[in-house]
Image (tube, rainbow, N blue to C red):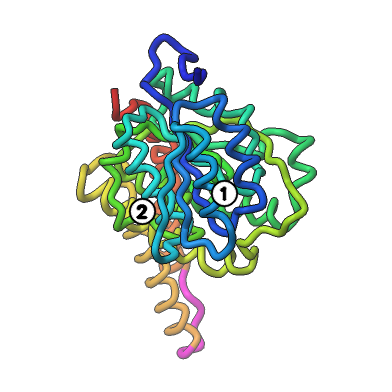
Amino acid sequence: MASTHLDPSSRGPVFVVIPAYNAEARLEKVAAGVLPRVDGLVIVDDCSRDGTAAAAERLAAADPRVRVVRHAANQGVGGAVLTGYRLARELGAGVVVKMDSDDQMDPAHLPALIRPILNRQADYAKGNRFLHDHELQRMPAKRRFGNMGLSFLTKLASGYWNIFDPTNGYTAISAAVIPLLDPARIDRRFFFETSLLLELGRLRAVVQDVSIPARYQEEQSSLSEWKTLVEFPPKLVRGFFRRVVYQYFLRDFTAVSLFLVAGLAGVVFGLAWGVVKWVQGSLAGVPATTGTVMIAVLPLILGMQLLLQAAVLDIQNVPKDVITE
């Protein structure tokens, strides 16, 4: 019997979704570690070119809790997970965990991952590898520093200032949140986990980090650090502006909205006035007067202070009330 009853306020059966692409070598080992801990397992074969489909079917034949879905065309990790989410919910899941097929996610940590959701403390929980110093030293240096930069940009874009390690794929979600997600806003490829955080931020869902070390194997990650550096930041910058406009101007108008408008106006006016007067003075060979300089500096300083205050209030505005009961 699966160990889903970790808390008397349990939200229901726990399912695991495994997006599998060319995962023949490790899929059965991963499933063997997962099945003793859950009520159901959904394997999504994302049009693999090896024996993944056959391995998945063997698992399904041996255990009725295993369901297999095959994509006719490759849809990426995001497409596979969304397919698994929908099926797990249809099968009655209360909590859905996403685990990769590469055996880097230790199923022993699954109870800790789902506990915030079962206890109604979060709508979504994710692993954080940066809370373990020993395991952190084993993470490749390029991935470690790249993750730090992406974590900061993700905080800006999502509004979740309380989380770190945004690309961590060991996650759990309340099944009640799944129908609220807009699939059109969720990336189908390697930006999936981060785009899901942006979508959860739009819903004001509660997200919580859980300290979980990674298990690094000998294989290389399929996600290039350079590709991440090029593709992720522009998407996160766009996500930041979309969030600010939606959260502070379309859905509501708060002190943050006022500080942003006044702060931007002050900064723009100060910079524009200063540049214009500097150019005029340079062409005329006449230095700017103290008054002219102050007219540029004061709005600039006040504008920056207002923008910083807006950032402080935004950090304090992290979602705290779960959206599902």
Name the residue at 60% across, 46% down.
27
Q: Is residue 262 visible?
A: no
Q: Is residue 286 magenta?
A: yes
Residue type at mark 1: give it: Ala
The local secondary structure at tag 2 comes to helix
- 136 left or right, relative to 314: right
Q: Which residue is mark 1?
A: 55
* Label number found at residue 263: 2
Res 200 → quadrant: top left
Q: Is residue 40 magenta?
A: no
Name the residue at 68% across, 40% down.
214
Res 30 → quadrant: top right
Residue type at mark 2: give it: Gly
* Label number found at residue 222: none
Between disc 2 and disc 1, whose residue precedes?
Answer: 1
Question: Of 215 and 93, which appears nearest the observer?
Answer: 93
The local secondary structure at tag 1 comes to helix
Q: Is residue 103 visible?
A: yes
Question: Of 146 and 40, which appears nearest the observer?
Answer: 40
- 254 left or right, relative to 298: left
Name the residue at 37% across, 42% down.
85
Question: Gap in Å between the C-alphas at discs 2 and 1?
Answer: 58 Å
Q: Which quadrant of the rendered structure holds the C terminus?
A: top left
Q: Which residues are magenta?
A: 283-289
Can you tell which of label 2 and label 1 is closer to the viewer? Answer: 1
Question: Are there few (<14), some (14-19), or many (20+) residues within 10 Å of tag 2?
Answer: many
